[in-house]
């Protein structure tokens, strides 16, 4: 049972880290004018747009003029959620 919980915790940690890198890549490509037909750009947009859209609707103040702070808010939210889930799963081991 302990091995299963550790495996689940590591897989979830890896999934969070991968999604954090996807959000960072999305934020970085937003600084340039990327080709919207590029498959990598399309993947980054399709992987992050649903979450960022909901975050922007929930907190409209994240878009201040030309600046969009929703990726930063999402990164903070993902980091906190990652820590909470990891600590919960490791608490189950004790």
Image: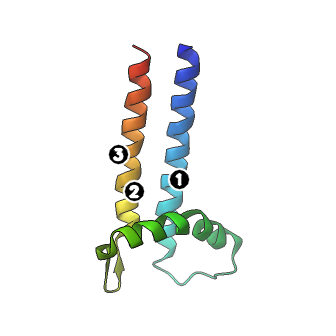
Residue 9 on image: x %, y %:
51, 30
Q: Where the C terminus falls, by quadrant?
A: top left
Q: Are marks 3 and 1 in contact (CB under 8 Å)?
A: no
The residue under label 1 is 19
SS type, badge 2: helix
User: What residue is at 37 percent from the left and 30 percent from the top?
Assistant: 87
Q: Are marks 2 and 3 in contact (CB under 8 Å)?
A: no
Between discs 2 and 3, the one toward the N terminus: 2
The image quarter containing residue 59 is bottom left
User: What residue is at 45 percent from the left and 67 percent from the top?
Assistant: 54
Measure the alpha-carbon separation of dots 2 and 3.
Answer: 9 Å
Between discs 1 and 2, the one toward the N terminus: 1
The residue under label 2 is 75
Q: Is residue 79 left or right of residue 20?
A: left
The residue under label 3 is 80
Measured along the vertical axis of the image, is residue 60 above or below residue 85? below
């Amino acid at each position: 049972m302990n091995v299963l919980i550790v495996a689940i915790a590591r897989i979830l940690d890896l999934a969070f880290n991968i999604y954090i890198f996807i959000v960072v890549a999305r934020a970085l490509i937003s600084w340039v004018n990327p080709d919207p037909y590029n498959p990598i750009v399309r993947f980054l947009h399709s992987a992050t747009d649903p979450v960022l859209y909901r975050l922007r609707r929930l907190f409209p103040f994240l878009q201040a003029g030309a600046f969009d702070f929703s990726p930063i808010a999402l990164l903070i939210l993902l980091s906190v959620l990652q820590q909470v889930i990891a600590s919960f799963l490791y608490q189950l081991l004790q």
